[in-house]
Image: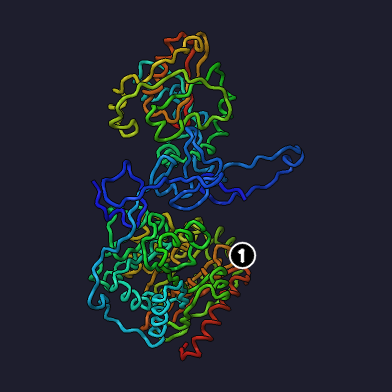
Amino acid sequence: MIEDDVLFGRQVPLEGPPQLPNVVAQPAIKRVGQRQQCQRCWQWLRPQDQLPNGTWYCRQCLQMGRLTSQHKLYTISEPNRFSMLAKSPLTWSGQLSAQQWTAAQDVMTQMRAQHNHLLWAVTGAGKTEIVYPALAWALQRGWRVAWASPRVDVCLELAPRLRQAFQAITQTVLYGDQLEPYRYCQLTICTTHQLLRFKAAFDWVIVDEVDAFPLAMSPLLQEAIQHAQKASGSHLYLTATPDERLQRQVARHQLTVTYVPLRYHGHLLPQIQVQVTWQWRRRLQRRGLPAVILRQIQHFLTERRPFLIFVPHVADLVLVERALKLAGISGGATVHASDPERQAKVQAMRDQQLTFLVTTTILERGVTFPGIAVLILGGDDPIFSTAALVQIAGRVGRSSQDPTGSVICYCQTHTQTIRAARGMIARLNWQGKRQGGQP
Amino acid sequence: MTVCVWCQRPLKTSLTLAQFWRWGPVTPPDICAPCQKRLTPIGDQHCPQCGRQQMTCQLCQDCQRWDQPLVNRALYCYDAEMKAYMQQYKFQGDYALRRVLQRALATALTQLTYDILVPIPIAQSTWQSRGFNQVTGWLTGQAYYQVLQVIDQDKATPQSAKNRTQRLLTPQPFTLASQAKDLCHGQRVLLLDDVYTTGRTLRHAATQINLTGAKAVTSLTLAR
């Protein structure tokens, strides 16, 4: 027997119809004209997705459990069964800076008007805190809110902060391979994939790091946001590096925008220094890292400054690790997306047990290590997009005690993406300087 | 743009000079080169009975314990990658993944000598829920005969959740179809299954086929 709140605003495939009031059932795969459409991910099925026994199955959302045309999705429309609060649920004791406060007011106005909005704030501007006043207002009125991100790391880092900031609000975290069962909560922190399980559930959807992989190139996930919010609902995009599509929407006035060009501590972004290193990859495969890079690493080690080394591919991790060992440098680790100890290594770096991490682009965003420096190996590789480079540079100088730090990009050629990333940082810094930012 | 069936990454296909001069239709591969490398094919050095990959060509320990000989050939090692594949194809039910192994199986079938091909059937209830037979999914137009039928049993524990001793105690799950005697009598029969684990299922099937008076019964599995 299941509780009815499991079905509030969700779409759940069940074995049989539940004995609950107000349950609406609909087939998981619906025939529309000549084509079949999955009712969970709203994608069209291909003609080859038919099984030999005549049923259809959706391949797009297969990871969330297979849906066939034999399944039914059960839902109860969202009743917002939350109590109205007399006073604001915000239990965060921090202070917003003047420019953060202006941005927060802007976000609040747009949310109350239920407009879709974009908050374009540089890395380290305190995007999360800027949203707090508006979020407190929404939760006080009994709205159901989702805070979604394409990246599970972002969700996991965010969850304890939000729990601290809104202690009276029921919260849950949803992501792919978790063990905890689903709970009906007012504030849902989840990956964008998990939004597929909801239907017209949220009054407000906040999408953090909206330009991150895989959301940016996935029409499936973009649809998921649309369907997870109520017809009367709206969404807020948060990012430091909006992609072409979003910038175009802003230019056409389809999306309102708030700019925050300055970090919360009032210092400008660190600019990427480009160092052309001839044939670094060949040298890495043969002997080891070029001397110029090793010298820089030694410099960081004597300065006792923790640092990150970004490499383009997983295969490069082993080579760099070997090269560092040959040079007698230890005290770090390598990490990549499918590393089983990924969470533990990142935590060890945060606790300053490790002096450096060699990583692929997975740590490009959403993580904060105090007082670090960054080296990018092969910044001319197509895997480092302009947005990725700006995000990587944004890992540096995030704390107010240590607002500076170096970002050095080693590459064979000075490519257009590097030029564009440097241009974007320069432009934001120019805007920031006008608002009184210091280098 | 075509994508790899398994990892969904874009397929990079390049036209070779040989393909160009042949002037015929070019069929792009179904899976990308990194995915192709994920599976480990079994080479020449394998157990003469069960087909397990090993250093020598002698009978392996498991086969020495069997008193019912059965010659089996296997295409790939049943390692972590193969398990991941089977998990997605068979248990998650991603029917499109059949294309990953279709070509390998087609080549293997042309190299073996047999008269009729008998795939191991699945229970009616599995057919209903899964929607396809995982073994016949791999076939691309090769003629096969459903000579065997599954007796519907209550599947309290699935075969894959049992240990070796429990699996060896599995009772005979197959019966012969009505036309089996006419089809198999005096023929060389090749059984086809997905995974050879203990050999219990295949030997049960071979026992039934032998009752029809088949000349020889061998088997082929995708993994061992």
Look at the numbered disc 1 and give the secondary structure of its residue.
loop
Q: Is residue B198 above or below residue A147?
A: above
Taking the image as drawn, is residue A216 in sight?
yes
- Residue at point 42%, 17% (across, down): B206
Q: Residue furthest front?
A: A22
Query: Which of the pair A225/A120 is nearer the observer?
Result: A225
The chain under label 1 reads A
Q: Is residue B30 above or below residue A209?
A: above
Q: Residues within 10 Å of mark 1 (few under 14, many from 20)?
A: few
Residue A158 image position (x, y, % from top left): 34, 68
Q: Is residue B42 left or right of residue B25?
A: left
Per the image, the residue denoted by label 1 is A279
Please tell me in which quadrant of the rendered image residue A182 appears.
bottom left
Q: Is residue A433 above or below residue B15?
A: below
Q: Which of the colour schemes (rainbow, by chain, secondary structure, one colour) is used?
A: rainbow
- Residue at point 28%, 62% (across, down): A185
Please tell me in which quadrant of the rendered image residue B15 appears.
top right
Amino acid type, label 1: Gln
Residue B14 image position (x, y, % from top left): 67, 47
- Residue at point 47%, 90% (across, down): A435
Taking the image as drawn, is residue A295 in sight?
no
Q: Is residue B98 left or right of residue A264?
A: right
Query: Which of the pair A435/A293 is nearer the observer?
Result: A435
Residue B68 image position (x, y, % from top left): 38, 16
- Residue at point 48%, 80% (across, down): A270
Query: Which of the pair A284/A58 is nearer the observer?
Result: A58
Q: Is residue A241 above or below residue B9?
A: below
Q: Is residue B27 left or right of residue A350?
A: right
